[in-house]
Amino acid sequence: MNKLILGMITVSLLAACSSPAQKETTSTAPAAPQASTAADTSATPTSAADSNVAATSNMAADPAAADAAAAKAKADADAKAAELALLDKRTVYFDTDIDVFHDADKEIIMAHGKNLGKVFLLKARVAGYADERGSSEYNLALGQRRAQNTKKALVAAGAKEGQISTVSYGEEKAVATGHDESAWAQNRRAEISYDIAK
């Protein structure tokens, strides 16, 4: 009888001990960190696409920022177009017996000097010219001074000395064949041409 009572007490104790252990193993406590992790990752962008969406929604929320970005993009595009337009111009002009180019042509020289400074593989040649008046020797010397002064201005704007060569054609290779100031003004010039460095 004592053995039976002892057995029943043992069984009930075992049952009581095993019941809390089952409750612990089925507990949902570990799920809480997963939920917070999901919440954390949803709060921060997980890809470039999410970042772009966030940036776009920020700009939509701030129209002033969107307007400023659009204005900057337009200003950058306008500046690039203006630079390309200047690089299309390769001739600068001089007054009679003067070897310094016109002030109006300074922007052309600046654009070409910066361009040469950025692209070291480019080589440029500056050819100097004069109008038909004066002796051949005088005009050759004047054309050379015009080419040299144009080269100096290109170097001051960013080109390297070794990128630029000079030549004078004096009164040869005239672009205008008239014998008046209109033609002479077109022939008093320096021309910039480009070659890829060998």
Image (cartoon, rainbow, N blue to C red):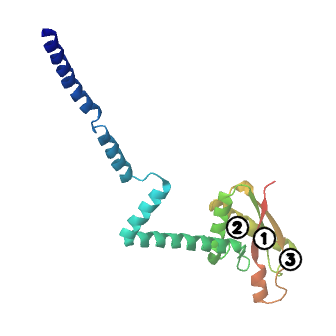
Q: Is residue 145 above or below residue 51?
A: below
Question: Marks 1 and 3: CB-CB under 8 Å?
Answer: no
Q: Residue at x 29, y 42 (%)?
A: 32
Image marks 3 and 2: residues in contact by CB distance under 8 Å? no
Residue 144: which numbered mark, if any? Answer: none
Q: Which residue is mark 3?
A: 173
Depth order, front residue of 90/144: 90
Question: x and y percent of residue 96 in the render?
Answer: 73, 80
Secondary-structure class at tag 2: helix
Dot 2 amino acid type: Thr
Which numbered tag is attached to residue 150? 2
Q: CA distance from mark 3 to mark 2?
A: 19 Å
Q: Amino acid at mark 3?
A: Lys
Say which element carries label 3.
loop
Check disc 1 and give the amino acid type: Gly
Asked if the residue at tag 2 contacts the one at tag 1, i.e. Cβ–Cβ closer than 8 Å, the answer is yes
Q: Earlier in the sequence, mark 1 or mark 3?
A: 1
Q: Residue at x 63, y 59 (%)?
A: 158
Residue sitting nearer the eye, 152 or 7 = 7
Q: What residue is pinned by disc 1? A: 128
Q: Residues within 10 Å of mark 1 (few under 14, many from 20)?
A: many
On screen, residue 61 versus residue 144, left or right, reads: left
